[in-house]
């Protein structure tokens, strides 16, 4: 073996994680580049018209009378993109793709932080898997959606929560809220921890809307009405309410009743589920650790999206990321992770193809069964009685 070969191999052995990181990052960028020209219905009917309106009516100044339904912080980013000599399709996707990588990095850091001895290898595996999850690829690079943005901030909030840096965690929750209302699905975890732990103040929750208001200041300065700060979220609550569910595998795939008759009962059921979890935690005087917090957070995301009406294809995005993180850390619930990923592909295909899959009702039944098993495992975990469970892979 020549000297340069020995030196090369020695360098590879010493820096293999860094080299793999570079290779994986480049391959992830290439995979997204191949999807750059796809135009989804959301882009054609919503994102591009909003972009063109901003571009043709003063760009940043057009925020004063913006007509779309995304929150001011995201629209502010979109208005800045109008100054770039790049097609709207590409510039909108680039922003989401950047957050794909930030999300993968944050997920990898979370795993490294929680893993025994802060194992960096597990963090690298997480980074790789998140970047190549089909739903992550499709969401940003193909669909031109921005779920990776609010999910990144949600994962950062979880990291700060596990580190017991509470006001920082609420800042990240506020950033998540600023981009998507769906951040609220993780909020019951914070309420349960607030009541059971007594480690942070109720005033921390005020940070969430405060951050949103701060991020809206640029839009307000150019004339956007103050009412727009929160009105977009209220508008979102009223969209697609003609049926109980839209291409999402939850219980309402099996119920075909006019939403007006059952929507409030359905919301009440979700609230009751969260209250019962709180009662269970208080009754058993749960002694918290990282696994219990992550597991309960994932269970809340699953229950909320499974029992709430009007769920869309992308509303479990945070839960899908956390499920992968949880499996890598604790080697549990593999079937749930796999089914969630398969469900997402079916749901995304139903929207992007325009043909609702006939598999959704069947998948919702299987998915519901696995959620029940996961709930059972989590409830046992909270009281430290799951060490020898035989159903952990479920």
Image (cartoon, rainbow, N blue to C red):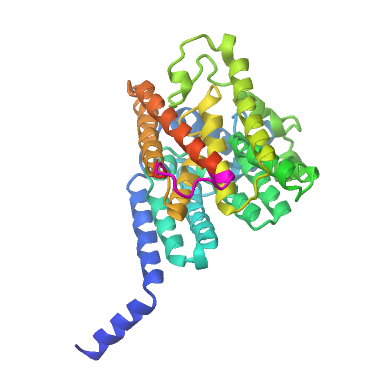
Q: Tell me the chief SS of the magenta region.
A: loop
Q: In which quarter of the image is the N terminus?
A: bottom left
In the image, the segment drawn in magenta is: 381-391
Q: Which residue is nearer to you in this view: 349 or 85? A: 349
Q: Which residue is nearer to you in this view: 161 or 273? A: 273
Q: Is residue 339 visible?
A: yes
Vertical comparison of 231 with 337: above or below: above
Query: How far across and down, in percent of the image, does residue 147 sit?
Result: 51, 41
Q: Is residue 150 visible?
A: no
Q: Quadrant of the C terminus?
A: top left
Query: How far across and down, in percent of the image, does residue 56 sit?
Result: 57, 35
Vertical comparison of 108 with 307: above or below: below
Q: Which residue is nearer to you in this view: 49 or 163? A: 163
Residue 26 lies in quadrant = bottom left
Q: In this view, does 104 lie to the left or right of 168?
A: left
Residue at 38% over, 55% down = 29
Query: How far across and down, in percent of the image, does residue 269 sit?
Result: 60, 22
Q: Which residue is nearer to you in this view: 155 or 55? A: 155
Q: In this view, does 234 lie to the left or right of 93?
A: right
Query: How far across and down, in percent of the image, does residue 357 sit?
Result: 33, 23
Residue at 51% over, 17% down = 244
Is residue 387 in the magenta section?
A: yes
Is residue 14 in the magenta section?
A: no
């Amino acid at each position: 073996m020549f000297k340069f070969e020995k030196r090369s191999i020695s360098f590879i052995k010493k820096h293999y994680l860094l080299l793999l990181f570079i290779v994986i990052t480049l391959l992830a960028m290439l995979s997204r580049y191949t999807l750059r020209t796809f135009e989804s219905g959301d882009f054609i009917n919503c994102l591009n018209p909003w972009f063109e309106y901003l571009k043709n009516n003063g760009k940043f100044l057009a925020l004063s009378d913006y007509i779309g339904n995304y929150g001011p912080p995201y629209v502010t980013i979109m208005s800045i993109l109008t100054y770039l000599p790049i097609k709207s399709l590409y510039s909108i996707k680039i922003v989401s793709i950047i957050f794909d990588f930030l999300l993968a990095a944050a997920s990898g850091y979370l795993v490294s932080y929680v893993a025994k001895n802060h194992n960096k290898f597990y963090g690298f595996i997480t980074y790789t898997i998140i970047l190549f999850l089909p739903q992550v690829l499709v969401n940003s690079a193909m669909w031109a959606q921005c779920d990776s943005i609010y999910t990144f901030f949600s994962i950062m909030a979880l990291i700060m929560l596990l580190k017991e840096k509470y006001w920082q965690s609420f800042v990240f929750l506020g950033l998540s809220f600023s981009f998507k209302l769906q951040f609220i699905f993780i909020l019951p975890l914070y309420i349960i921890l607030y009541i059971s732990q007594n480690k942070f103040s109720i005033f921390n929750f005020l940070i969430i809307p405060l951050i949103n208001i701060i991020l809206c200041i640029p839009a307000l300065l150019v004339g956007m009405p103050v009412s727009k700060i929160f009105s977009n979220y209220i508008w979102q609550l009223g969209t697609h309410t003609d049926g109980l569910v839209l291409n999402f595998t939850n219980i309402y795939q099996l119920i075909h009743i006019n939403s007006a008759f059952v929507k409030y009962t359905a919301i009440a059921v979700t609230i009751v589920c969260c209250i019962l979890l709180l009662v269970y935690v208080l009754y058993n005087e749960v002694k918290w650790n990282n696994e219990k917090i992550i597991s309960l957070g994932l269970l809340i995301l699953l229950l909320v999206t499974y029992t709430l009406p009007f769920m869309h294809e992308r509303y479990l995005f945070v839960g899908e990321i956390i499920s992968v993180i949880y499996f890598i850390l604790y080697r549990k619930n593999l079937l749930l992770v796999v089914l969630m990923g398969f469900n997402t592909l079916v749901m995304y295909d139903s929207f992007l193809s325009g043909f609702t899959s006939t598999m959704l009702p069947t998948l919702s039944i299987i998915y519901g069964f696995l959620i029940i098993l996961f709930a059972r495992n989590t409830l046992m975990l909270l009281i430290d009685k799951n060490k020898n469970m035989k159903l952990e892979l479920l």
